[in-house]
Amino acid sequence: MAIYRINSENIDIVGLGKMIIDTRSVSWNIPHLHFFVSFNAGSYESTCLEFGLVATGNTQEEAAERLIEHTIYHIGAVINNGDGFEEFKEVSLNGFMNEYWGAYRHIEFCLAETKRDLSNEVESRIVRALQELFDKRVKDLIYSMARTAADEAIKEYEKMSVFKINSVRYVSLEAAA
């Protein structure tokens, strides 16, 4: 993809990634986690920018998968044995990954120019999913209301149909006198 100079080293970044982790067991969330995959000396290395975690693999995908596993293990360890949210925040905000972040943002902006950035892709999927959910709920509501209205109309008809008009006679008082 592109070679970037980070911490006095040339790093050949070949891919970007974003992890969205759901922390259902605790009362707080972990923001999206960003990573990139680089190629160096015949192997691939993936780096989590928030936590500074690193994993390697023989392919880009293997390096990314190992980083995801490592990140999940790390999150579990910090939740169970560490300082939880405060530890994540402290590590993420200390600035030791600023040069990596600069390279990541540069690539993301270059990709955004042609709408191929990760944020657009991920958020577009989320927006589409939310829109589909909204559409389904509105349709279900309309169906429910229509069904309720139809049921009510049928009940009213059944009440009214108890009385049937067999005939009507009208006589004016003048004609009857």
Image: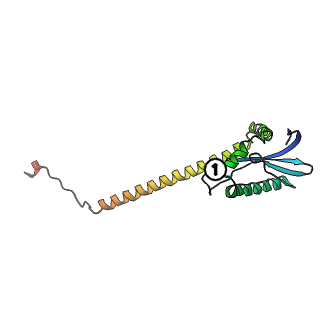
At mark 1, the secondary structure is loop
Q: Looking at the image, which residue sits at the far bottom?
A: 162
The image shows residue 22 at horizontal and vertical percentages of: 65, 54
In the displayed structure, 66 sits above or below 31; it is: below
Residue found 76% across the figure and 38% down from its top: 105
Q: Quadrant of residue 155?
A: bottom left
- The residue closer to the viewer here, 87 or 45, is 87
Q: Which residue is mark 1?
A: 29
Q: Quadrant of residue 149?
A: bottom left
- The residue closer to the viewer here, 11 or 98, is 98
The image shows residue 8 at horizontal and vertical percentages of: 88, 38
Q: Quadrant of residue 169?
A: bottom left
Instruction: Name the side, left or right, on which 23 lies relative to 157.
Output: right
Q: Amino acid at mark 1?
A: Asn
Residue found 70% across the figure and 45% down from its top: 90
Q: Quadrant of the N terminus?
A: top right
Instruction: Name the side, left or right, on which 40 lies relative to 107.
Output: right
